[in-house]
Amino acid sequence: MSSSQNKAEASPASSDSETEKRERGPVKRAKINIQCMEEGSLLSLLSNPRFSDVKVIVGEDRLQYDLHRAIICLQSTFFEAACKEGFIEGNTREIELPDIDPGAFEIVATWLYNGGFSIKGKLNTEKFCDLYKATDFLGIDSLKRAMMSGLAKSLQEDMQKKSSDSAPVERVVDNPLGLIYALTETAPCADWSLIRQVTDKVIPHCRLSGAWLRGLADSDPAEINGFFTAIMLDSYQEFISSMFCGSCTKSVRNSAGKCQSCRKSFNYHKREGPPQKPDKST
């Protein structure tokens, strides 16, 4: 059999992996823009692939990040598992993350190399949730805590700002309840305490009407976000309980309550009136 025939027979099998690579698209080296990056620091390793020993390919555009296993495995349970022997990623030293946004991963990589995390300017809800989703998938609890702590601080500062006719207030988060709702659609229920850290900053400054709350009950059960509903009610309940002792709570429910600020009496049961019952005679 001639050598040309051997090549012809071997070509279909050997081209399978090449075809798959072409379908996935070419890899582009990512450029991480980090300000105030000191020479010799861990952050400087992000822009220098000289000593890297693992390639992380992110997103549909297949951006390649040259990273270091000894660094990324310390805080990420996903990378720790992926870099172990026996995993395909561990053998090839390439890790594919097609569902993670490159912008979010850049923040993740910066955090893993001790770059820190901060919220600057107007917060984009979609991008913030993309980052939280990536952090949850990669198992980086330290970044989750930093994100929620920074968000809670920004919300607290927003609530303390006062608007005026001449200078409108520029807030970091325009719609806090919308952000919490989006987070509860992204975060697992195991992150209850982290989401509560943010919710507790918003609840004291929000007045949810009875109509708004009844709207949750009227929603299609298939569309109800149970995590959001539960965490809102739990935060409200704790907020109200923190203002009254047990005896005063009973007094308020018996229509003998007073405003905790101006001490004026108010009727707890007639805030909006009871729901109207349908007229059965018609």
Image (cartoon, rainbow, N blue to C red):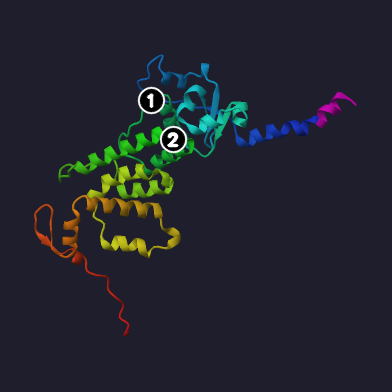
Counting residues from the N terminus, which is met first, the one under dot 1 or under dot 2?
2
Residue 233: quadrant of the picture? bottom left
SS under mark 2 = helix
Q: Amino acid at mark 1?
A: Gly
Choose between 128 and 6: the one closer to the eye: 128
x, y (%) of residue 96? 56, 33
Residue 68 in sight:
no
Judged from this view, the residue extending furthest toward the front is 247
Write the start and end of the magenta stretch as one range: 1-9
**How many numbered badges does the structure rendering display?**
2
Residue 52 in sight:
yes
Q: Amino acid at mark 2?
A: Ala
Residue 166: quadrant of the picture? top left
Q: Residue at x 31, y 77 (%)?
A: 278
x, y (%) of residue 66? 52, 24
x, y (%) of residue 53? 55, 21
Q: Residue at x 52, y 20 (%)?
A: 52
Q: Is residue 271 above or below residue 35?
A: below
Q: Residue at x 66, y 35 (%)?
A: 20
* 145 relative position to 162: left or right: right
Crowding at mark 2 (Cα within 10 Å: few <14, some 14-19, many 20+): some
In the rendered image, which residue does mark 1 sit on?
Answer: 115
In the rendered image, which residue does mark 2 sit on?
Answer: 104
Q: Is residue 140 above or below residue 236?
A: above
Q: Is residue 244 above or below residue 10?
A: below
Residue 106: quadrant of the picture? top left
